[in-house]
Amino acid sequence: MDGSSQARQEPITKRKTDKPIDPLDISHRAKWSVSSFKFGFGAECLLDDDPDTFWHSDGPQPHFITIEFPRKMAIQKISVLLNYPLDDSYTPSALAIRAGTGPSDLQDIRMVTLDKPHGWVTFDVSSEPNEDGDGLNPVYAYQLQIIIAQNHMSGKDTHVRGLKVLGPVQEFVGADDAFAFKSPNYRMYETLR
């Protein structure tokens, strides 16, 4: 675990056509829960794509967001929407990321520090380089937990305005590919028994 990691915006991977593509958003495939919340400011505010709403914790620190997938998923990045100018001491300044198969075996995989963030902050979940040396490996897990370890100015409660879990970018499949069934919808159902 790298305790001194700085969150940074990373370049978007490009296809052969050099058009930018977004990583695969897998947030909707999971069940979300939070450690605590004030009425009307629950986990649903993390997923509503509205920068004016936010999850507002209401309990002892540390605060955490737990994301449970129905099957093992490849998780590449996390994008978190924060607004230090509006939220001040409610803004997270240190995040710990844990992953595993369930609540009993979650392991720390990444620590991220944030300095007065404003807008979407995207970072890799893993800190291990891939085999090609041109990026970082995804993490394969059933459960992901984001822990708000510390807020700016030692604030107690926290505000998070949005959160997305991103899978690895799928390479473009051409029409001449003999095994062209690689769309996200196909992959989602290919392992049903």
Image (tube, rainbow, N blue to C red):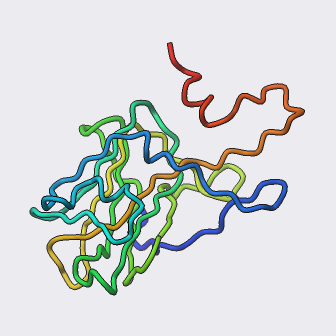
Nearer the observer, 121 or 56 = 56
Residue 97 placement, left or right of 167: left
The number of discs equals: 0
Residue at 15 percent of width and 56 percent of height: 36
Q: In which quarter of the image is residue 42?
A: bottom left
Image quarter of residue 116: bottom left
* Along the viewing direction, whichever of 67 and 105 lies nearer the viewer: 67
Q: Residue at x 33, y 72 (%)?
A: 52
Pick the residue in front: 163 or 112: 163
Q: Tell me where residue 43 appears, x and y as whole percent.
A: 27, 54
Of the 4 image quadrants, the one containing the N terminus is bottom left
- State whether residue 120 is above or below residue 174: below
* Residue 150 appears left or right of 130: left
At x 43%, y 30%, the residue is 71
The residue lying at 50 percent from left, 66 percent from top is 122
16 up-or-down from 95: above or below = above
Splitting the image into 4 quarters, where does residue 70 fall?
A: top left
Where residue 190 appears, as percent x and y from the top left, is 59, 22
Hey, which residue is sitting farthest right in the picture?
Answer: 176
Give the farthest residue toward the top: 193
Using residue 116 as the reference point, say whether residue 75 is left or right of it. Answer: right
- Indicate left or right for 107 with 130 as reference: left
Q: Position of residue 125 (x, y in %)?
A: 47, 56
